[in-house]
Structures are given as structure tokens and as C-alpha cells.
Amino acid sequence: MEEKKPNLHDKKRLVVVAFCIFCFFSFLICQFFKIQIQEESYWLKKARAQHQFVIKEPFKRGIFYSSGDVSSVHEDPPKALVVDLPMFHLYIDPNSIPEEAKEDMAQNILSFLPLSSAAKEKAGEQFKKKSRSRKLAMWLDKEKKEEIETFWKFFAKKHKVASNALFFVQDYKRSYPYGKLLGQVLHTIRDGKDAKTYQAIPTGGLEYYFNKELQGSFGKRRLLRSPKYPLDRGDVILDPVNGSDIYLTINHHIQVIAEEEIEKAVKKADAKCGWAIVMNPSNGEILALAQYPFFYPGEYRKYYGDKELIEATKVKAITDSFEPGSTLKPISLAIALKANKEMELYGNKSLFDPKEKIDLTKVKFPGRKVGIKDVAISRYVNMELAIQRSSNIYLADLIQRVIDTFGESWYREQLQDMFGFGKKTGIELPSEAPGFLPSPGKYYKNGRPEWSVPTPGCLAIGYNLMVNSIQMLKAYALIANGGFEVDPTLIKKIVSHKDGKDEVVYENKQEETKPRRLHPEIAETVIHAMKYATKPGGTAFRADVPGFTEAGKTSTSEKIKNGTYAKKVHFSSFAGFTPAKDAKLVIAIGIDEPAYRFLPGIGKTHYGGKCAAPVFSEIAKRALKYMGEVPDDPYGHPVGDPRRKLDKADMTQEVKELKELFNKWHNR
């Protein structure tokens, strides 16, 4: 039988079929390449989304620790002033919940949540969403989490719902074990996180200043979508990194003392508010920074929702500037003594003699229609009497002599470059006010000059300039430590936690580098003069610290209201240090707007010597006892104390001789 040969038409058809098959398989190969190679990550992510999901593994924000090494008699380890407590956010996966179970599940779950009616209604709407992840509630504690899980275990089994249709995401929430302690300085963070970075949002204080250091980085945890997969289990695919811890110079015991005493003082004076700062004058470490009314960080919403309460969230010792008044007089004396020293170096006659008898009635000031007056009227004084009795005329006269010899610029340089007025101290808190120090040749917006002929006399007694309490503390520390400049600081060290290791990334070593700005002999002379102020006959005698020597100065400066000085509205303050030699503490007290009143047997209570000086005494007395300091004036105790021996107490003879000199000059 003859074999049939394929004709040309069949051959063409075979070629076409073969070509189509080739093209089809080529297309498949291309698609496989595209899906498995080019789009691998896309389809892998899509596939995994059906069976698993990734949640952020939270980190702990850095912790603030107090200092614990200022006491020689107590074991006082650092304390965590704020802690991160584990909390939980509740989520559901609506797509995994059968429609017939949603309403029953919603009613039961919402009954566990501490939400308002409106919030529950909003949470109930989440069950109707087409989504794999909807948030129902935030910041649930461990007990509430366990309560919901117990219910969910039986509900999910009964209704055959995937166990991961309800899940918790762990987070950390700031908690304050000591409540208000150091509240304004620490501040807090908002309940909600930043929408883009999921990082905490600080409200102020150290939380804001060190936000970058306190931040950590999230880890990742992978969970499976499976009815049999246990709740809250999964692999950590990236470990979280906790934020750096910050060790403060604040001592918690001294902070408690300061807060207790400033609260009592503000209430007693019926004042608007008040603050107290305690610092180590040798290295600038702030041991306490207390302010009343207090701020409770855990209740920040209450404060920021009230126009009056919001004032309590500020650290007024650095944000508020005031005219320092008489607390500037020791500074003026130090500048005048430095001018004396300069004159001696060039072989010239001194500008003044500290023992010189000055007739205050004959002192004249250029550019003044109305002369400067003293509160305590005296005709004749010397340097020590002037500080003891807080003479405005004497100090203004000294500075006028300085101006006449060295010029305005030299005097201003001493105030700014030596004592730091008119510029920020750089303390580690936001919103520090630089204060104001007038400059020759500069003008206000209204065209009036900042500096005129009478300006030096005003500056000498603490007017026509603005300072904050930290600046004043820094200036007094320079005198207390023998002339060394120190910068106030709240930070001892910062410790990071990278790669599972603790590393000190910053350590305060200021004590090793402090420059000397004032001759030690000048500092010693000023300190001796200031000691008269805190003894009988001085304006600050209520600042006396039993068993210890001290030096300080009071002030009662009028505040400007509606463009003029208000005679009944004051800022009363005290600044000083103890012991007077080798000082361990320098303390600044501010009482803002104490009540203007007269009490029988006490007198006018708004004076700094009445409402601010006693706070210094109480804080210093309690702090020195806690620190285990040995009294350097063991016989200097109040009347009635068996340890009192007036003839052996510090400054007894000097005060007696000064009083006799004053009486002699005034024919008393």
C-alpha cells in the first residue's frame, strides 16, 4: 500500500501549531520569571499577608535616674524617677471573624473595656471594617489583658473563630513612682505617638531636651494567622533597642526636702508661686530644683487644659526673668574690689577703702533728678555695714567710682563675662531665658537708649537688668568656691544600650576644667562681708543655719505692672551658701508675689528676709544633716538650744564690734 505523503497545507499547519506552542511556553516562562524573580517580594508579601503578619516589637524609652552619692553616712543608690510599665493595645482582625459572630463578640469585648459610651460606639464600628487590623483600645494593663484573654479563649473555641482574630500589641507607658517629685524638670510624653515615626512626643523638660537620646528603635515580631496558632506567640525577627538612660545630678532626698520647704513657704506667704534650687558650687551639679505649685506628669492633660494650671508646668527658675534687687549687691562689691585690685597692679590709689567711713548724705549721682534712697536709714557706713544693712547708696557709689575710672564697657564686661548675666547658662532644659543686660550705644524699639548716665547706679543695686535664678546661682557659686566659674548642670552621665552592651556616651567632668574668674582674696572679702547679713543686725538673720556658717543676701524687688513699678507687688528672694568656707551647698530661693500684709509681732511679711531667707535655713539645715557634714560652727545655735555658746559662736565678736562702730558713728 502506498504511503500517503503530507501535503504542503499540512506542513504549514504543523508549523503554525508548533510556533503557537512555542510562544505559549515562552509566555509561561516569561511569566514565571516575572512572578518568581522580578516580582518575588511583591507576591511573597501578598502570600504571607494571608497567613502571617508582622507587628512592631516595642522598645523601652530611656530612664531618668537620680544621683545617690552625696551622702557620707548613708548608702544611697540612684533611684529611677520614671519607669516604663508594660501596657497593651487591643486589636481585632475583622476579616477573620465570621459575620454571625461579630455582634456577639463586639458586645462581650466592649463590656471589658473602660471606655465612655461614645468611645465604645466608635470601637464597635471597627468590627464592620474590611481590614486585617483595627484598634479597639489603648493602654490596657496586664490584669485587663488577662481578663479579656480568658473570655476570648472560650468564645473563639465555641464560635470557631481564629484565635488571632483578637490580639494584643505590647507597648510601654511612662509611670512616675514618686508622683510630683521633680515634675517640672522631668515633664512627660503624650499618650499618643507620632503618626509617622511611632516615637513618643515629649511635652517639655528633660523629656524634650534629651528626646533624641531617650528614643530607641523598634524590633519586629512575626505572627501567624491560623485558628490553631496560639495567641501572642511569634518569632522576633529584629530585636528592639532601648533608649539611653540618663543619670541626673539631682539627689532624691534633697529634692524631697526642697519641695517640702518651698511648699510651706509659698503657702505661708500666700504667694503666687515659689522655687528653690540647690547646687554644688564646686562643680555646678544641681542637687535639687523644686517648685510649688507642683506638676504631676502623669496628669499632664489636666494641666494643659487649664489656663491657670499650665503655669505650673514651667520651670520658672529658668523661664522667668526678674530684677534681682539686693541679691546683686555682693556681685557689685566683688566688681568694685576687682577694680581696686586692678588699680593696685598699676601702682595707683585704690578706688575705695573697705574700712572707709562714707557719709551717705553727701553722695551724689550724675544724671539723677531724684537721688537713690536706703530702706534702713544710716548716715555713715563702711563696706561691711553696707552689706549688713543692704545700703543702696553705698553700692551705687562704689560702681559710680568704677565707671568714672574704668568706663561703662569694662563694668558691663564684668557683669556678663565674669558673672554670666545677659546670656544663657546652658543648663539642659528648654526655654531658658537669657535675661537682659543693657548695652551702651543700643536703643529700645521706642528709641530710648538702653544705657544712660544713671544706669550704673541702678545696676549696682539690682535694677535695670533681668536675670533668672539659675544665673544668680551661678554667680554666687563663683564667689562661694573662691572665684572659679562653673556651669549649672543636671546631668552626670548618659548610658546607651547598643548591641546588648552598656556604654557611657557622656560624662560630666566639669570639675576638672573650670576656669578662675575672680581672685580668691576678693572672694574671701565678699564672703566675710556677706556673713554679717545672716547674723543679728543683718537683713537675712533668719537665714542662719544652726551649727554652720553661712553667707547670703536677701532681696525684695518691686515688679513692673502696667509699665510702672508696683509698690505692693514684689519678687522676694534669697541667695547664699553654706558653710561659708569650702561651701558644699549654694541655694537660691524665689518667692513670686508674696502677699503684701502686716502681721503683729512680725511686720511686713513680703520682704525677702521674712519669706525667702527662712527657706534657705531649713533646706540647708536638713540637707547638711542628711549629707553627714560636720558642723563648722558647733556653738552657733538658737536661743534655748543647750549647744548654744554665744561667746564661742562664729561672728559673735565681729558683729558686736560692727554694732559698736555703727553706734559710735551715729552717736548712739
Image (tube, rainbow, N blue to C red):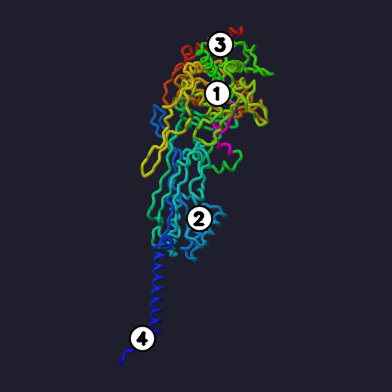
Q: Name the residue under label 4.
A: 6
Residues tagged 1 and 2 counted as in contact (Cβ below 8 A): no
Give the camera-side residue of 545 and 307: 307
Q: Is mark 1 on a helix, strand or loop?
A: helix
Q: Give the range drawn in magenta.
A: 309-323
Q: Mark 1 points at which residue?
A: 413
Cα gap from disc 3 to disc 4, whole angstroms: 141 Å
Cα gap from disc 4 to disc 1, whole angstroms: 114 Å
What is the number of the mark on residue 136?
2
Q: What element carries label 3?
A: helix
Q: Is mark 4 on a helix, strand or loop?
A: loop
Q: Residue at x 38, y 39 (%)?
A: 503
Q: Can residue 535 be seen in this view?
A: no
Residues tagged 4 and 2 counted as in contact (Cβ below 8 A): no
Amino acid residing under circle 2: Leu
Q: Where is residue 577 in the image (x, y as percent from the top left)?
A: 49, 23
Q: Name the residue under label 3.
A: 659
Q: Which residue lies furthest to the right in this view?
A: 369
Give the camera-side residue of 571 and 523: 523
Cα gap from disc 1 to disc 2, whole angstroms: 62 Å
Q: Position of residue 415 (x, y in %)?
A: 55, 23
